[in-house]
Image (tube, rainbow, N blue to C red):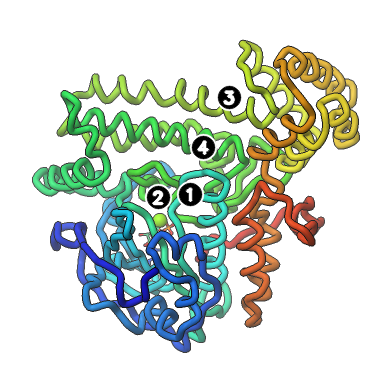
Amino acid sequence: MKALDELTFDNRFARLGDAFSTHVLPEPLDAPRLVVASNAAMALLDLDPAVAETPVFAELFGGHKLWAEAEPRAMVYSGHQFGGYTPQLGDGRGLLLGEVYNEAGEHWDLHLKGAGMTPYSRMGDGRAVLRSSIREFLASEALHALGIPSSRALCVIGSDTPVWREKQERGAMVLRMAHSHIRFGHFEYFYYTKKPEQQAELAEHVLNLHYPECREQPEPYLAMFREIVERNAELIAKWQAYGFCHGVMNTDNMSILGITFDFGPFAFLDDFDAHFICNHSDHEGRYSFSNQVPIGQWNLSALAQALTPFISVDALKEALGLYLPLYQANYLDLMRRRLGLTTAEDDDQKLVERLLKLMQNSGVDYTLFFRRLGDEPAALAVTRLRDDFVDLAGFDVWAEQYKARVERDGDNSEEQRRARMHAVNPLYILRNYLAQNAIAAAESGDYSEVRRLHEVLSKPFEEQAGMEQYAQRPPDWGKHLEISCSS
Ligand code: AMP
Ligand code: MG
């Protein structure tokens, strides 16, 4: 266990120099205080969880203090936003404080979001509000607990600093952690600004630090791109299988490591709805739930374009061709497991599609359906779940097919089936209304609900005593919340 002043820094990105990032000091928040910290994230830095309660913790992550070895930098990147290219973006309100090594030899970027203005702030104020910081914190840690790759969050620090959005709010900072903060947009920036030397340096950096095994391949950059395609196909399969809608899949929000990155108006589905749009400024539904799959490929194509100086177009196209089949295989594998199946049959895809269609037509809760399906033997479970469906005849047909399929699947002791299914079907997810309740309390100075919700979501597959209220369908007011895109 380490104290806060014992972290070991090695700032490899900062060493790439001023073409890649700019030195900027954090702008401190007034009266910084701990809102919530993640013990699991603290452990990644070998930090004793007790240090989160010390004043120096809030000072460090509220922008008042810095380690001597930290080298705060705002990174430059660009990206395609809603399909159009924006030539210059960058950390407009976040700073990469430095890279820290833990005792296991893993390194973690410490990125402070909401840290004030930078050369990339454009029209923004460099700040993040409490509500969006809490949402990012809860979502990153909840996704990780579900087994979905994501950036992590160490803590949220609240403050008295006024910040103007639609109304006056309070500023906050979230300390984000990831093995890298490099986005597709980093490569696009150097490609479109025609800086081949820096682009090559960036590619070497990513290859050496994050894809060293690709060095052994005859074409290391191609191997790296293939790996990025694979990781994104796996990531998006998980989003789709668990009902996560990112909301702003611009290429500047896509991680080079294939992790969920940059949280805005994201949402988990309550009722299953393939056409769900969580971002209310996304009028065309470019980033609707079901569009996440083709958009994943679109974004990878944008990255491929930026890699044309290193890899032949034919090879890039071939690698992009891996995306859909890989996505489908991963998705189907997860959905089979969610249905409690241990074997594969050709018609399983249809079994899943028919179920989703029925759920869509009847507005069935996506998470609770699968959880309850595993509570009991298949025949009993479908009888109980039947009441949730409007098209009863349709559901009965599906239920017969499902029972027959479970029968063919073989060994299905009641206990094993429940354990197997509950291990992949969460009881607790970050429903928007739950986040909203926790935010409302936090905005009036009570952080207990954020902390409790974070605790519950850190063990999403385990039924927790006294936490029934976190495993319910949303009340009417919580069903169609419009989450503000200003953050
Ligand atoms: P996002 O939509 O959060 O991914 O942000 C898109 C771009 O806008 C990024 O370059 C951000 O750094 C920048 N940005 C977002 N909010 C602010 C803000 N309040 N102040 C400065 N820059 C911001
Ligand atoms: Mg972003």
Asked if the beta carbon under badge 3 is closer than 8 A to the nearest atom of ligand 2, the reply is: no
Q: Classify mark 4: helix, strand or loop.
A: helix
The answer to whether marks 1 and 2 mark residues whose Cβ atoms lie closer than 8 Å is yes
The answer to whether marks 2 and 4 mark residues whose Cβ atoms lie closer than 8 Å is no
Q: Position of residue 379 (x, y in %)?
A: 86, 24
Label 1, label 4: how far apart the Cα atoms are:
10 Å
Ligand 1 falls in which quarter? Answer: bottom left
Q: Mark 4 — residue?
A: 292
Asked if the beta carbon under badge 1 is closer than 8 A to the nearest atom of ligand 1, the reply is: yes
Q: Classify mark 1: helix, strand or loop.
A: loop
- Disc 4 residue type? Gln
Q: Nearer the viewer, mark 4 or mark 3?
A: 3
Neighbourhood count class around disc 1 (C-alpha, 10 Å): few under 14, some 14–19, many 20 upward: many
- Disc 3 residue type? Leu
Is 311 located above or below residue 14 in the figure? above
Count of picture labels? 4
Instruction: Tell me the residue at 35%/84% (across/down).
Output: 64
Q: Nearer the viewer, mark 1 or mark 3?
A: 3
Which residue is most to the bottom?
31
Q: Mark 3 — residue?
A: 332
Is 368 located above or below residue 478 in the figure? above
Label 4, label 3: how far apart the Cα atoms are:
16 Å
Q: Quadrant of residue 262?
A: bottom left
Q: Classify mark 2: helix, strand or loop.
A: helix
Q: Which mark is residue 248?
A: 1
Instruction: Tell me the residue at 11%/43% (across/down).
Output: 196
Neighbourhood count class around disc 4 (C-alpha, 10 Å): few under 14, some 14–19, many 20 upward: many
- Position of 169 with respect to 215 (left or right) is right
Label 1, label 3: how far apart the Cα atoms are:
25 Å
Asked if the beta carbon under badge 2 is closer than 8 A to the nearest atom of ligand 2, the reply is: yes
Instruction: Tell me the residue at 72%/22% (across/down).
Output: 354
